[in-house]
Amino acid sequence: MRAAAISLNDAEAASPSPLVVDHVSKTYEAAGQLVPVIGDLSLTLAAGEIVAIVGPSGCGKTTLLNVLCGLIRPDRGRILWHGRETAGQPAGVGYMLQKDLLFAWRTAIGNVLLGLEIRGVPAGEAEDRARVLLDQLGLHGFADHYPSTLSGGMRQRVALARTLVNDPDVLLLDEPFAALDFQTKLLIESDTVKLVRDGRRSVLLITHDIEEAVSVADRVIVLSQRPTRIKAAYDIALESDRTDMIAARESAGFSDYVRRIWGDLEVARR
């Protein structure tokens, strides 16, 4: 187990990390009462690193992602993207939710193209990029299908392609595979990790699935109950192909990571 967080000075001494969260706090007002959600939280995300965050239900994981992508303002603290303090929505960041949120009136490729259209990317270039991603994600032949004709796993692949087509260098993923059956989840996890690692992208993944966290991530961070802080962090070292989710789960040490993280969560929720 490693230290829960490093200081901002340590992070800035090296080349700027894609993301540094520096002593961020957030409190909501509900029913006339103040509800502290995030309490003095600091973390860093290195270039090309996949970090999974687990924590008790309701501890503030989604709130943290909403703060990071600029949808919610923190009460205190700083968020630095590539060494620069950012108060609003950062550039070069993709955010994918648990629900696919596809537009029913647009085809699969139409949904993927939306961001490129808004950015004014030439139509031919945009379509080429979208079709390549759909093919890479196992959707060859389904580009012109509407969401109502696609399975849940296929819809989630379209949502992933829509996120990746804009070529973000950081991905914020909020339980994007939680609603999928186990087989489909493993396949999409493998495709996602391969695309992420091939592109040297950095990822912050929120999940309730400890096995998913250990098999996918380079580092797993365990959050406490509200107001959430970092309770523990683990560097994950598995002797397997990290794009093969079955091999990762069969690796020596996998079960030990799962057991220790589960123990942290059991304590954290009390």
Image (spheres, rainbow, N blue to C red):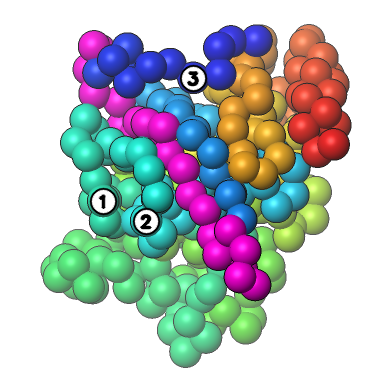
Q: Amino acid at mark 1?
A: Ala
Residue 183 in the image: state x and y as whole percent: 78, 48
Q: Is residue 217 left or right of residue 197?
A: right
Q: Are marks 1 and 3 in contact (CB under 8 Å)?
A: no
Residue 5, disc: 3
Residue 87, disc: 1
How packed mark 3 is, by other alpha carbons closer than 10 Å (few <14, some 14-19, many 20 or more), is: some
Q: CA distance from mark 1 to mark 2?
A: 7 Å
At x 49%, y 39%, the residue is: 204
Vertical order, 15 against 211 (above or below)? above
Residue 66 in the image: state x and y as whole percent: 46, 55
Residue 69, disc: none
Q: Which residue is mark 2?
A: 73
Q: Quadrant of residue 18?
A: top left
Q: Are marks 1 and 2 in contact (CB under 8 Å)?
A: yes
Vertical order, 142 against 208 (above or below)? below
At x 40%, y 50%, the residue is: 75
Can I make out residue 62 in this image?
no
Q: Nearer the viewer, residue 136 or 266?
A: 266
The earlier-in-sequence mark between 1 and 2 is 2
The residue stretch that appears in magenta: 13-34
At x 38%, y 43%, the residue is: 76
Residue 235 in the image: state x and y as whole percent: 59, 15
